[in-house]
Image (tube, rainbow, N blue to C red):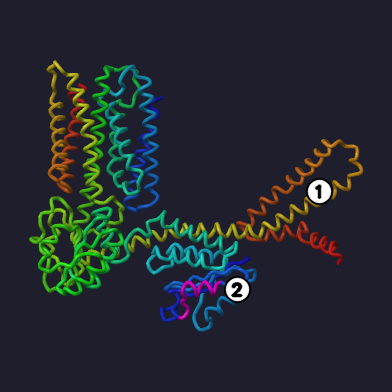
């Protein structure tokens, strides 16, 4: 059984092309069922890729069917088989094929595709191992730990100051889209948006309502500062809206100030106050750049993990080829042993029951010992050198021939 | 035999120190290697102390070098409580080189030998040395946490883009731990001092070291009052913990000239 993947991704096609083959989960599941046709198929469709995984005895036919389903000829597609296909899926699940290495969303998307696909033993094993590889990469490397956007960098820095953000109170100064994104990132980590202030009262009311906070008048900014832990400022004011003098004595409580505005909203002198940490847009951008560099560094370590997992899958796949041959070899040996014993039945007539059991056991042990080394070597060779040895074993022992002949005789042909 | 256990312990601590340094540069598997070095070294040092105790007539760590050996064991033991967590690995960068260095000094001073004789063996002495050293171990750990706090705070204040790279505990966590560690260590030191004073009752052989110990105790006492009573936190509290630790170092250096003289 071969594994085949046919698809396109952000590496091959621009968004205008990708959107032609993008599918929602239900449509992807339907396509997988249609392509499986009693076999195995999974369709993975995200904003960055649409891929069809098939397990089929004839890989050429599988590729053709998957290509036809993805409008081959009109868009450029990649095609991978067996170990390369497995390695590709493991890299996808680990986030190594994503725009931002290690991004976390893809693992959930792979799981959804797996759960809604038409899996049999091969694709079931492939996708379970892909999910395992994805988790392993995220736990054994730091690839997904560092922030990849300005808003997530702001939230990560706030966590570096306060630890758990549960109970942290946030003040939004300015109710623009940028501060909303940063606030959302903090809220996702447990912080509460306690107040929003803006020169446009209506917008402040709307944003405060969305986060369950209060809308306060812009000239009350100074009073609000006493009770909050994080300030996110993003107004279009031409001068500073927050100065060091406005910040009251906080009695040792830290204050984290995020200034996302250009020109800057917050007087840089705030940074000099004890317990105050001020980050402007350039500082946050530098953190993101450093963290992306770190992610690429970690990606190199993650590659070794997925390569190892792909190797494991290849060994397992190879064992699928060798198992029937081994079973056939054992069956043949047992047939010969039982047949020869039956022939000698007349000469063994004088043996007691106990002596007969000894002879049975002896012949079984001889057969098992003779087969032990060839079987071990077959398994090893299948894992390291492919199925060539299996074919040789079939030829040398005449596996399949005798069984076929026996069956033929039995069926009277 | 006991001396033979010293080298594996020192090598394991040394390996941990180097691995922590490597992990700080490139976070990853070296951190785990360091943690295992700490665990292994501590187990071997425990065996060394047990062997010393088995061979001695009385309290085996009644020399300055011997007490240093016991002190290192207590510090590493206290560190192990947090050191196994990945986010506290940076603390090992402060603790483990110090532990390896002090253990080597202890060995050079004969602190790892199993002599079989002891000048003191009263329960007073055992309690006094044990409690004071346990207190010092806690205060050493508090100083390491305070140093880590100041280092991380400096990175944040300077907007270092690498601040998230090290996966260190948050400032709030470090600040809280410094306070808690001192709050646990100071009562141990207080008890140890009380036992020492009880032993000295009626005698007049007070030495300058006792004065220094009282001074260190006062600094840490003030730390706790200011930390929990007045609300001192952050940088000020961290500096105060380090000032107290400077006195602890002075006490250690002064031990051979007075108490053990």
Residue matched to label 1 = A337
Residue B88 visible somewhere in the drawing: yes
User: What's the magenta region?
Assistant: A20-32
- From the viewer's perspective, tell me whether residue A136 is left or right of residue B183: right
Q: Position of residue B40 (x, y in %)?
A: 40, 37
Quarter of the picture containing the N terminus of chain B is: top left
Query: How far apart in space, not on screen, are marks 1 and 2 (Cα)?
Result: 42 Å
Identity of the residue drawn at 46% across and 81% down = A20
Residue matched to label 2 = A62
Task: Tell me: residue B212, above or below residue B94.
Answer: above
Residue placed furthest toward the bottom: A74
SS majority, magenta: helix
Q: Position of residue B29 (x, y in %)?
A: 40, 50
Task: Tell me: residue A315, above or below residue B5.
Answer: below
Label annotation for residue A319: none
Q: Specify the subunit that label 1 lies on.
A: A
Q: Is residue B14 magenta?
A: no
Q: Which element carries disc 2, helix, strand or loop?
A: helix
Residue placed furthest toward the left: A245
Identity of the residue drawn at 16% across and 68% down = A197
Q: Which element carries disc 1, helix, strand or loop?
A: helix
Q: Nearer the viewer, residue B77 or B105?
A: B77
Residue B103 visible somewhere in the drawing: no
Identity of the residue drawn at 16% across and 33% down = B217
* Sequence-first tag of 1 and 2: 2
Image quadrant in which you'd find residue B39: top left
Q: Position of residue A360 (x, y in %)?
A: 80, 42
Image quadrant in which you'd find residue A320: bottom right
Q: Residues within 10 Å of mark 1 (few under 14, many from 20)?
A: some
């Amino acid at each position: 059984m071969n594994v085949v993947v046919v698809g396109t991704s952000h590496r091959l096609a621009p968004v205008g092309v990708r959107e032609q083959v993008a599918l929602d989960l239900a449509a992807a599941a339907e396509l997988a069922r249609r392509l499986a046709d009693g076999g195995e198929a999974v369709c993975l469709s995200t904003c960055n890729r649409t891929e069809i995984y098939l397990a089929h005895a004839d890989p050429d036919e599988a590729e053709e069917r998957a290509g036809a389903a993805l409008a081959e000829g009109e868009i450029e597609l990649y095609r991978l088989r067996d170990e390369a296909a497995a390695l590709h899926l493991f890299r996808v699940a680990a986030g190594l094929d994503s725009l931002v290495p290690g991004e976390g969303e893809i693992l959930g998307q792979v799981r959804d595709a797996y759960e809604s696909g038409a899996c049999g033993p091969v694709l079931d094993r492939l996708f379970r191992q892909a999910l395992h590889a994805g988790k392993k990469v995220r736990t054994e490397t730091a690839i997904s730990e560092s922030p990849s956007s300005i808003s997530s960098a702001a939230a990560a820095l706030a966590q570096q100051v306060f630890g758990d953000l549960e109970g942290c109170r946030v003040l939004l100064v300015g109710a623009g889209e940028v501060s909303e994104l940063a606030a959302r990132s903090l809220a996702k980590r447990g912080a509460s948006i306690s107040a929003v202030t803006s020169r446009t009262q209506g917008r402040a009311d709307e944003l405060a309502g969305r986060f369950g906070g209060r809308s306060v008048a812009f000239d009350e900014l100074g009073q609000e500062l006493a009770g909050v832990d994080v300030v996110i400022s993003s107004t279009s004011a031409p001068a500073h809206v927050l100065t060091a003098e406005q910040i009251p004595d906080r009695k040792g409580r830290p204050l984290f100030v995020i200034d996302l505005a250009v020109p800057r909203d917050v007087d840089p002198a705030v940074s000099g106050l004890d317990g105050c940490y001020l980050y402007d847009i350039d500082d946050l951008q530098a953190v993101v750049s450093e963290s992306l560099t770190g992610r690429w560094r970690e990606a190199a370590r993650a590659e070794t993990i997925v390569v190892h997992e792909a190797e494991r899958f290849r060994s397992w796949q190879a064992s699928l080829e060798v198992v029937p041959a081994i079973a056939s070899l054992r069956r043949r040996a047992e047939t010969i042993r039982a047949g020869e014993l039956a022939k000698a039945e007349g000469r063994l007539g004088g043996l007691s029951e106990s002596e007969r059991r000894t002879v049975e056991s002896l012949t079984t042990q001889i057969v098992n010992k003779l087969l032990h080394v060839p079987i071990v070597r077959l398994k090893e060779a299948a894992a390291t050198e492919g199925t060539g040895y299996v074919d040789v074993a079939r030829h040398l022992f005449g596996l399949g021939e005798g069984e076929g002949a026996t069956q033929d005789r039995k069926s009277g042909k | 035999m006991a001396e033979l256990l010293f080298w594996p312990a020192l090598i394991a601590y040394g390996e941990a120190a180097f691995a922590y340094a490597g992990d700080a540069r490139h976070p990853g598997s070296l951190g785990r290697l360091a943690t295992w070095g700490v665990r292994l070294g501590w187990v071997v040092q425990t065996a060394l102390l047990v062997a010393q105790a088995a061979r001695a007539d009385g309290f085996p760590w009644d020399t300055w070098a011997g007490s240093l050996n016991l002190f290192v064991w207590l510090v590493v033991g206290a560190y192990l409580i947090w050191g196994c967590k990945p986010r506290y690995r940076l603390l090992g960068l402060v603790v483990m080189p110090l532990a390896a260095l002090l253990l080597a000094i202890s060995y050079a001073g004969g602190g790892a030998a199993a002599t079989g004789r002891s000048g003191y063996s009263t329960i007073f002495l055992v309690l006094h040395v044990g409690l004071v050293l346990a207190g010092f171990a806690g205060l050493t750990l508090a100083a390491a946490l305070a140093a880590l706090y100041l280092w991380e705070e400096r990175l944040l204040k300077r907007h270092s883009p690498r601040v998230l790279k090290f996966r260190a505990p948050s400032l709030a966590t470090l600040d809280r731990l410094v306070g808690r560690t001192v709050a646990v260590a100071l009562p141990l030191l207080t008890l140890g001092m009380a036992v020492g004073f009880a032993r000295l009752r009626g005698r007049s052989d007070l030495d300058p070291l006792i004065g220094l110990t009282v001074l260190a105790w006062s600094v840490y006492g003030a730390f706790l009052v200011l930390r929990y009573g007045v609300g001192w936190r952050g940088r000020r509290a961290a500096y105060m913990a380090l000032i107290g630790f400077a006195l602890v170092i002075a006490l250690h250096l002064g031990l051979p000239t007075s108490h053990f003289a």
